[in-house]
Image (cartoon, rainbow, N blue to C red):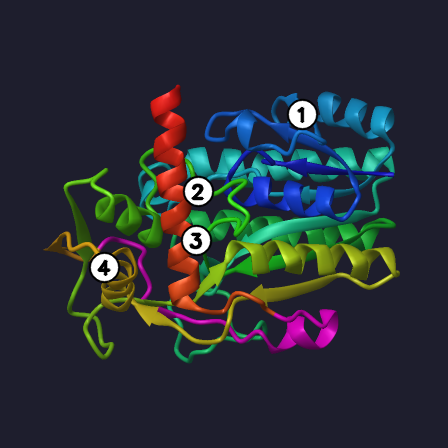
Amino acid sequence: MTILVTGGAGYIGSHMVWQLVDMGEDVVVLDSLVTGFAWAIAPEAKFVQGDCGDMALVGRLIAEHQIEAIIHFAGSIVVPESVADPLGYYLNNTSRARNLIEAAVKGGVRKFIFSSTAAVYGTLEKVPVAETAPLLPESPYGRSKLMVEMILADTAAAHDFNYVALRYFNVSGADPAGRTGQSTAGATHLIKVACETALGKRSAITVYGTDYPTPDGTCVRDYIHVSDLVAAHADALRHLRSGGESLIANCGYGHGFSVFDVLDTVKRVSGRDFTVVLGDRRPGDAIAVVASPELIKARFGWQPRYDDLDGIIGNALAWEASLSRRNQRE
């Protein structure tokens, strides 16, 4: 049996594909390559370029490859961009996911793992946040993901279909073996941008808001290493294969770092200083977003291996340097 990974040429998806290959799984990757890179896909996986919302294409892949489970990463992820282009986000994140889920049901795929987001919670009154907290997303991005969670719940109630939706916190770092990492040009992830600035790829980095009610005035986030995140997906797959019921769970470490904490760490780990510009707040940014990971630890036995900001940034810096060498060769 084969695992279909949508968005498997992207940042998190490519790490998942390598993880599955390392586990000895047969993998098919479906990616439009709008933001992904074919070279990031493990060579053992079969790659198909296409739209995950194309039900006819997905149906053919399910039948041809005897797809057992779908892990769905494809989507758009930038909060301010979603505020400017809500219809684009509802199309890419919600409508295409809805089509993918229908194709899965029609093709007899009973296991589905979905990349959701902490943005479904909105402004948090209490951190760390548990899965039982009110769901009040404040951006089209968060709402587009919450809608998919609702579609999955309704589908599971009506069909022989189980799912795990993992609510990501701030995914960071790169494969410790150096096989893949965050490669998208113009990325907005803080650690990615800070590493690019430290290596001279950007002239400066902007801090968006220094007047938040936090210890140093900047936003606080729970940064989870991408390798720990994909390990959680592997745990979710084992859970569904063993007959486990549908589940929604946070993926984070349970503690956060401020923007200034991250910038100071990047400077220290890289040994390089760089220019930091202080800017205004951005629409849609929450004050503090920190996970309670107790549920996923209890239900899956998930045990993070890379919960260390220095290590996360060290891996990100190493990948950024490797990416520079790749771009120079090309």
Q: Residue 187: percent from the left, percent from the top?
A: 35, 40
Amino acid, disc 3: Asn
Residue at image location 62% in from the left, 54% down from the top: 230
Earlier-in-chain disc, 3 versus 1: 1
Earlier-in-chain disc, 2 versus 3: 2
Q: Which residue is mark 4?
A: 267
Assess whether residue 287 is covered by the magenta stretch: yes
Amino acid, disc 2: Gln
Q: Could you give the CA–CA distance between mark 4 and mark 3, rounded to whole angstroms? A: 14 Å
Label 1 vs label 4, nearer the camera: 4
Q: Which residue is mark 2?
A: 182
Q: Which mark is residue 47?
A: 1
Q: Residue 87: percent from the left, percent from the top?
A: 43, 35
Q: Could you give the CA–CA distance between mark 2 and mark 3, rounded to whole angstroms? A: 11 Å
Give the magenta range. 282-303
Q: Is the C-beta separation of discs 2 and 1 under 8 Å?
A: no
Q: Could you give the CA–CA distance between mark 3 and mark 1, rounded to whole angstroms? A: 26 Å
Label 2 vs label 3, nearer the camera: 3
Earlier-in-chain disc, 4 versus 3: 4
Q: Could you give the CA–CA distance between mark 2 and mark 4, rounded to whole angstroms? A: 19 Å
Q: Residues within 10 Å of mark 3 (few under 14, many from 20)?
A: many
Q: Could you give the CA–CA distance between mark 1 and mark 4, rounded to whole angstroms? A: 38 Å
Above/below status of 226 relative to 126: above
Amino acid, disc 1: Phe
Task: Answer whether residue 64 is visible to the viewer in this image.
Answer: yes
Q: Which residue is mark 3?
A: 315
Residue at image location 70% in from the left, 57% down from the top: 164
Q: Quadrant of residue 216?
A: bottom left
Above/below status of 226 relative to 82: below
Label 2 vs label 4, nearer the camera: 4
Q: Secondary structure at mark 2?
A: loop
